Image (cartoon, rainbow, N blue to C red):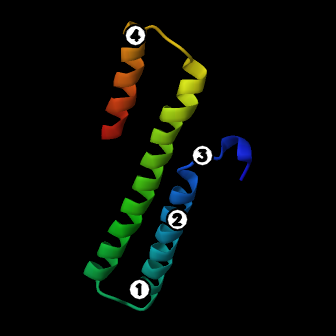
């Protein structure tokens, strides 16, 4: 990874993605072994959650750090719009 775009949350994101990778490999093995669909669906759900959380963390980190660098200092009334935007993205 390039140090230029390395943020404090990146190790956490990598950890989540590796966990998702392990779950996905397990799902493939389960399908090939003919495991019950309920078991497979539960594991797929775990993969989706891990990836979604990694994505959410990456986006929030970007907004909290990279956007701030681009926007720079702002007047309080202008700052509110940026803060509201960052807050509402937590519900994506």
- How far, Cα to Cα, is label 1 from label 3? 35 Å
Front position among marks 2 and 4: 4
Give the label, 2 or 1, closer to the camera: 2
Give the mark nearer the N terminus: 2 vs 1.
2
Relative vertical location of residue 40 with respect to residue 54 in this rendering, above or below: below
Front position in the image: 35 or 92:
92
Residue neighbourhood size for the residue with mark 1, other residues' Cα within 10 Å, grouped as few (<14), some (14–19), many (≥20): some
Residue at 54% x, 34% y: name it: 65
Can you say whether 56 is above or below 33 in the image? above
Q: At 25% across and 79% down in the image, what residue appears?
A: 38
Name the residue tied to disc 3. Answer: 7
Which quadrant is the C terminus positioned in? top left
As measured in the structure, the alpha-carbon distance from the residue carrying label 2 to the one carrying label 4 is 37 Å
Alpha-carbon span between mark 3 and mark 4: 27 Å
Q: Which disc, if any, is residue 4? A: none
CB-based contact (under 8 Å), mark 2 and mark 1:
no
Residue 30 - label: 1
Residue wearing tag 4 = 76
Looking at the rendered structure, the secondary structure element under dot 3 is loop
Other residues around mark 2 within 10 Å, as few (<14) / some (14–19) / many (≥20): few
| Residue indicated by mark 2 | 15
- Callout 2 secondary element: helix
Residue pictured at 45% horizontal, 81% vertical: 26
């Amino acid at each position: 990874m390039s140090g230029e775009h390395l943020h404090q949350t990146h190790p956490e994101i990598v950890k989540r993605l590796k966990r998702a990778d392990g779950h996905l490999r397990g799902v493939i093995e389960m399908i090939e072994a003919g495991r019950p669909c309920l078991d497979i669906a539960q594991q797929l759900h775990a993969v989706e959650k891990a990836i979604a959380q990694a994505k959410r963390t990456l986006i929030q980190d970007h907004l909290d750090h990279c956007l701030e660098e681009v926007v720079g200092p702002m007047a309080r009334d202008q700052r509110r719009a940026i803060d509201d935007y960052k807050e509402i993205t937590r519900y994506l």
